[in-house]
Structure formats: C-alpha cells, structure tokens
Amino acid sequence: MPTRSQQSTLSVHRSLFCHLDGTILESDCQTGAVTSADGESDLIASRTAAAVRAAGPAGDPFGLYIHVPFCATRCGYCDFNTYTAGELGGSSSPQAWARALDGELAAAAAIVGDTPVSTVFVGGGTPSLLGGAGLADVLGTVRRHLRLADDAEVTTESNPESVSPEFFDVLRTAGFTRVSLGMQSAAPHVLRVLDRTHTPGRAVDAAREARAAGFEHVNLDLIYGTPGESDDDLRASVDAVLSAGVDHVSAYALIVEEGTALARRIRRGQVPPVDDDVLAARYELVDTALRAAGFDWYEVSNWARGSGASAAMGVSAGASATTGTWSSARCRHNELYWEGADWWGAGPGAHSHLRGTRFWNVKHPARYAAAVAEGRLPVAGHEVLTDSERHVEDVMLRVRMRSGLPAASLSPDERDRADAEVLAGNVVAVPGSDGRRYVLTDAGRLVADGVVRRVLG
Ligand code: SF4
C-alpha cells in the first residue's frame, strides 16, 4: 500500500498541468517575473511585448493553445480562469472574445512568422459552448494568421453535455483531429460532489459520437479520489471509459484548491477531506485496469492505447520502462509542453513560452479584449528563465515521461543521485539512442516528485 508521502507525486500533477496548459494563476509563477496586476501597467506590458518580440520567432515544434474562458456553471473544485455569464455580467461575450482572439493571433503571426504550427489545443473553460460552427470559426482564424503543419494535431476540449453528433461532424469537417472530453466519473454521487452537470452515461455516449463522426483520437478525462468515491465507483468509471472505445485516458487525483466551493464544504465538515493514501491506491487501480486493456502510460497521468511499448521495452519485474516506439494516440500538444518546446497561448490568462521567455495574458476577458483593441499584445507580465530554472523544470517534466530523463542532461552529482534511485527501485536506467535514460518504475511513479527532489539535491 503506498504511503501518504508517496501520494504527493499524484497531487502535484494538476498544478503542473495547469501551469503548462496556459491557465495558471499569475501568483503561482512569479519568481523572477515582471508582472502587472491584470495588465494595468502599460509600461510593464510594453516591456513584456519587447521581451516577447526579442524571443521570437519560435523554433520547431511549435504549439498553439487557445483559451476559451466561458462555462455554463462553475464546478465546485475548479479554480481555472473561466467565467459564467452571470460572473461576466455583460462585460464580455463569445463574439467579443473571438474578435480579440483574431487580433492577438495577428500580433502573434507578426512575431513567429512562418513557423509551422504543429499542434493546436483549444481548451478552457468550455470550448464546446461555442458550438461546432464557433469552433470551426476559431480554426479558420488560426489558419488566416498562422501556418498549420500538414500533419498538425488539432484538439478541442468538450463537455459531454454541450456536444452532439452534428457538433462532431462540423468539427471533423473543419479539420479538428482530436477530441478531449471531461468525464470525471461514472458515479452520479461523485459527479454531484464535483458539481458536474452531465449525467453519468453522457460522456461515454459523447465519445462514441465522436468516434462515429470519424475521430480516431478521443480522450476521456477521469478524476479519482473524490470524497465519497469507492474503489467500486472508480472501477465502474474505468470500465465505462473502456467501453467507449477511446484511445487516450487522462486520470488526475482530485486536488482541492483553496478558494473553491469544494474547499469551503470540506472546511465546514459537509464533505470529508481527500485521503492521500486512498489517492495512491486509486492511481494503481486505474493504471492496472488500463494496462490490462492495452493502454500504456507515457506520462504519469496519461495513458495511450496501442503503443506497443509493453512488448518493445523488455519489462523487468516492477519496472515499466521503455524507449520504444510511441503510439500516435498520445497527445502531441501536451508532449510539447513536457519537452520544453515553444508555444503561444492565446486568450485571457493564457501562458506562452518562446525560447526561455515565458509570458502570460491578462486574465479578465474584458481587459483582454480592451488591450487587443488598443493594438497591444494583451500581456500581463513575463519572466526570462535562468539556465538553472530551465534545468529544474526539465528534470521535473522529463522524469514524469515514459521516454525518461536523459542522463546526459544531468551533472555528474545528479547522475550519481539518479543511480541511487535505481538502487532504490524508483527508476531504471535504459539505453537510448542518445545514451542512458532514467525511467520511473511502477513504484517510482507514485513518488516522482521525491525522485525529482533527490536527483536535483
Ligand atoms: S467545466 Fe471545467 S473549466 Fe468549467 S467550471 Fe467546470 S471544471 Fe472548471
């Protein structure tokens, strides 16, 4: 049974993911950063714009993240930069957002030039609230300003309750190649605790509709460890995922963020707190079930079907390391984040990274649109990462990937400490075309953050 301390690997993931998907709170990444309060300082914004221009054009591969900051209702556990119509109070609208997006992408094109966009990820928020035609327009806007690579992966997140067979048909015709659906759980009482509004079977039906429309690549998101969830509830959720015929699953431990409705309910004793040991056991339950069904993990919280990795890797007892071939089912856009590549994040609150310069947009949709209307990049701040900061990030992210942490990227002392992790059974050293790589074992995946801390010293 994993211990409480082992669980920390699982709990760290959501903040890491949020950091990378362009929606992190500004206060979470301020070390060494130049920032303004939601873009109020024109001076800082113009300095940031100068830094961004100096950093571009981006290299290859290059990703584009588009943040849609609208949701029908606010889920109790969510602290993303998203707004309901009531919260906006008429200060913004999808139409105003689309006009501003057009302006920001025009500005982005002036900086990144002809660099081909290898992945597009439309996230939120709830992108599917825009409807199929609205999302097709978004992709049209992207194409007007930027050059999509011939084999570009184009993903949109969608909520099960706001999609239909016609919606997926329109997306497919427009050129989307991948759909990611928020399922979270198949248990009605778990969905209630999360304040999710869809009915339990709806996500599976939506995934089937996407497949029927011709989407080869469909992801379902699961959340495990919600108060009140049992092992059987989670098993039923994984079974439902497997019945949907998807080729990708993301499963995240529930993180209770301060300031959310769920955090308040737990504080008042209305809902029991999340148990860290239970989270670790649930991770193992998910991993075991997915692997038995032919999925392979390629990042600690992400599994893709049919990579053939299990056969290629020569699995040893307790180890699941490979540098073998990877499935096209994996999400290339997320891999781009994890590998430290360049991406532009467009939309309110979105974060970008170009050649070691990170910058982020103002968060409120009305201020975002106002900045673009004034002909400015809608940036709120930026930071230039030092070599040391980039190295720490690189180790943190690559340890979590099944392709592993290259020994060549480590100092001699760090390599010695990584070798100690081999002896401890947390990683295995596997040969790769570029030398040795350290890859987490099954046990090591539960303690990945500890491995990072110890390797970095
Ligand atoms: S639908 Fe997603 S982004 Fe919107 S409030 Fe719920 S969890 Fe947050």
Image: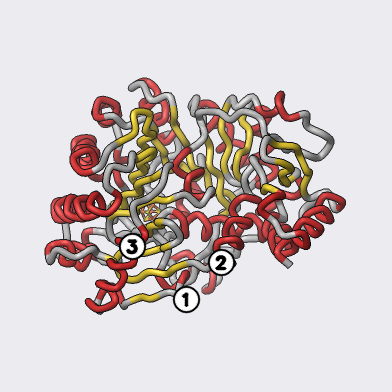
> x and y percent of residue 360 in the render?
35, 64
Seen from the viewer's position, the closer of residues 159 and 43 is 43
Seen from the viewer's position, the closer of residues 125 and 119 is 119
Residue at 25 percent across and 42 percent down: it is: 146
Circle 1 — which element? loop
In terms of image quadrants, where is residue 208? Answer: top left
Q: Are marks 1 and 3 in contact (CB under 8 Å)?
A: no
Q: Is residue 179 visible?
A: yes
Q: Which residue is mark 1?
A: 32
Q: Is residue 139 above or below residue 58?
A: above
Residue at 45 percent across and 52 percent down: it is: 192
Circle 2 — which element? helix
Q: Dot 2: within a 10 Å radius of its alpha carbon, few (fewer than 14), some, or many (20 or more) residues?
A: few
Q: Which residue is mark 3?
A: 54
> x and y percent of residue 152 in the render?
37, 33
Disc on the earlier residue, 1 or 3: 1
Q: How is the image coloured?
A: secondary structure
Label 2 sits on what residue type? Glu
Label 3 sits on what residue type? Ala
Q: Are marks 2 and 1 in contact (CB under 8 Å)?
A: yes
Q: Is residue 38 left or right of residue 382?
A: left
